[in-house]
Amino acid sequence: MKKLDISKKLYSSGKMLIQNCPMTEISNEYMKAKLYLPDAQNGYYRATRFDWSGVIYALEYKKHSYFSEWFENHDPFIHDAICGPVDEFTQIGYEESLIGGEFLKIGVGLLRKPEESRYDRFKLYEIVDGGKWGISEKKDSVVFSHLLESKIYAYDYTKTIKITAGKPKLSIKYSLENMGKQPITTYVYNHNFFTIDRQITGPNIVVSCSFEPKGKWRDENSPVTIKRDKIHFLRDFRKGETIFMENMSGFSSDKDNYYFAIENLRSKAGVKIMGNQKLARVVFWASSTTSCPEPYIFIRINPNEKFTWKNEYEFYEF
């Protein structure tokens, strides 16, 4: 493959702080991915916003790079100092809990409620019970299991990240079993921190949707426009610049599937993001270093019931 001359478009990324961080690698003949593993003492991510499992800090396909640090400085306790297709579950039981009581973040554990008016996902909370993590590794897959058993909530959460045999595809399969006495009601979304070939967000990055998106940007002067089913950036973003659409509309809440695609027109690399559940909400956020469609699904699991879902990623050149 001819070497790409995109040096002027590369953004600088913070140095990977990999010393003592547990990690693993999965691969097939087309692609390879490197993951950080959950660890309460030495884990790369130990904050309380995102699920600790499935942190892919590098993925390569045909010499293209799809994930990397999109931020400049890393700290394991910063809420969003995390890479890859990472999940966040909305808080459970926060409003019902008294000050000093406990509430739940799946994939993190039971957290302490401080004296504040409402939950803040950007805040670092005290972890009361981090549950037990289990990890099973193979050449092409990693299975994460998170078991939490408490008087209020109990669950068995499994996430399987697998590279598809003979294809440039990655699947993430989820299973959440409610073993407690209370229903588990939450939303979950994947933040999709893609950094395709580490190119600055701008006209060479295009995001496509399986529907015609509509909505208002947080800043009406944002350098972005929507044309039919595509999101286009009008110029290169300045360092630290962001755009945000909180409630994107236009999708059907009756369909059991959806997709987004992110393409780098300069390096000719793309990824298609697919889910097998009904969309409950869509948020879109981008900074100068990453473009992130955030598809939400709704989950309600009664005691002794289980819910499963799946996300898939197809990598390609064009």
Image (tube, rainbow, N blue to C red):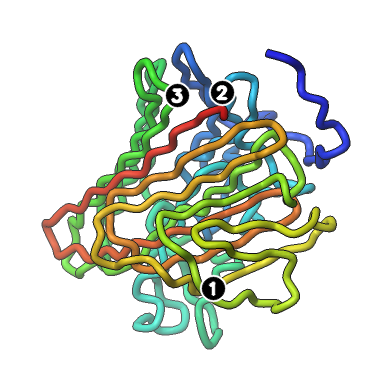
Q: Position of residue 292 (x, y in %)?
A: 57, 54
* Mark 2 residue element: strand
In the displayed orientation, state which residue is furthest to the bottom: 117
What residue is disc 1 on? Answer: 246
Mark closest to the chain's N terminus, 3 or 2: 2
- Can residue 10 be seen by looking at this rendering? yes
Q: Amino acid at mark 2?
A: Tyr
> Counting other residues with Cα less than 10 Å from the Cα at mark 2, is it few (<14), some (14-19), or many (20 or more)?
some
The residue wearing badge 3 is 168
| Spatial CA span between label 1 and label 2 | 31 Å
Point out residue 33 in the picture as x, y percentages from the top left corner.
Answer: 53, 26
Q: Left or right of 26: which side holds 195? A: right
Query: Could you give the CA–CA distance between mark 3 and mark 1, rounded to whole angstroms?
Result: 32 Å
Where disc 1 sits, the SS reads strand
In the picture of the structure, the residue carrying the numbered disc 2 is: 61
9 is higher (above) or lower (below) than 182: above
Name the amino acid type tagged 1. Glu
**First in residue order: circle 1 vs circle 2:** 2
Q: Amino acid at mark 3?
A: Pro
The residue nearer to you, when weighing 63 against 153, is 63
